[in-house]
Image: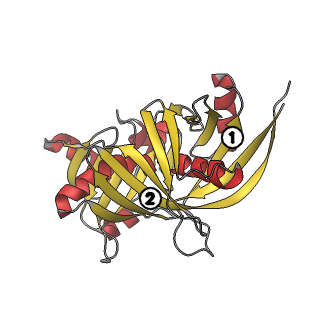
Amino acid sequence: MDLPIFQIDAFTLKNPSALSGNPAAVVPLNDWLDDRQMQDIAAENNLSETTFFVKQDDDSYHLRWFTPTSEVDLCGHATLATAHVIHQILGDEREQLPMTCQAGNISVSVLSKKSPVRYRLEFPQRAPEAVTGKRLLNKISKILNTDVQELHQSRDLIAVLKDEAAVRDCNPDFAALGDLDCFALAITAPAEHGRIDFVSRFFAPRQGINEDPVTGSSFCSLTPLWAEKLGKTRLQARQISQRGGQLSLDMKGDTVRITGSTYHYMQGVIRIPD
């Protein structure tokens, strides 16, 4: 059995000469493979996420995402990459692409048709709650090898650092991070430059990813956090991993709108043994 596969960079930087953003594998299916096969393919791809999707009878798309080690309920960059495949490669020209996943109904809007095409995710808001108490804050500071100013918790643990330099230079103890009882840890701080509001990085060793290049789902929590801190609902963010990525963010009720660009890097065929 042969399956098509596409590798798409999502949330790319504005400089088209540099490969940036977060690469995701996208595998369109007519019918679902069994879970073990999908997990094995994701492990073989060895990217932070592989999306598998099936078109439904109502013309929506059902998405599932796998890291190299586990399935996740929501993934931003791989959804953006999937929208690219559905819109630009498979030819679905609707301005809004309806999707479903474990986290519920989501959708992606096509904001432009000129290259680079920009897509907007409609994701559920996951406002974090402040974590009180010095013990955990001191523990996270030790793991990150830098002073943590605040801690917040939603799906991810979020550590607010002093400034952008502290985020950029952070060198965590990944073994100790993997022992934390949380899905992942995001670090964040105000940006140095006025056009960007805040920066972040994202560590998920428990999911088989020491550092994720750009993590769309983390902004379901980072956006309400910084919207409250900065007193505005429209924000510009950068994830300052080695590859780097840029996102435009907008709060609307219980929804976080996450906008970014994509780049079609590679495509091929998966050979599945009979």
Residue lying at 59% horizontally and 69% vertically, measured from the top left: 114
**Residue 122, percent from left and from top:** 41, 47
**SS label for mark 2:** strand
Q: Is residue 65 visible?
A: yes
The numbered mark at residue 171 is: none
Which residue type carries mark 2?
Thr
Q: Is residue 140 left or right of residue 98?
A: left
Which residue type carries mark 1?
Val
**Residue 138, percent from left and from top:** 21, 47
- Indicate the quadrant containing the N terminus: top left, top right, bottom left or bottom right: top right
> Residue 23: which quarter of the image?
bottom right
CA gap, disc 2 and disc 1? 22 Å
Along the polypeptide, which appears first: circle 2 or circle 1?
1
Residue lying at 25% horizontally and 51% vertically, measured from the top left: 224
**Residue 174, percent from left and from top:** 44, 46
Front residue of this view, candidates 228 and 66: 228
Front residue of this view, candidates 140 and 157: 157
The numbered mark at residue 27 is: 1
Above-or-below relation of 29 to 220? above
Q: Is residue 39 left or right of residue 171?
A: right
**SS label for mark 1:** strand
Residue lying at 14% horizontally and 42% vertically, measured from the top left: 132
* Residue behind mark 2: 259
Q: Is residue 236 left or right of residue 113?
A: left
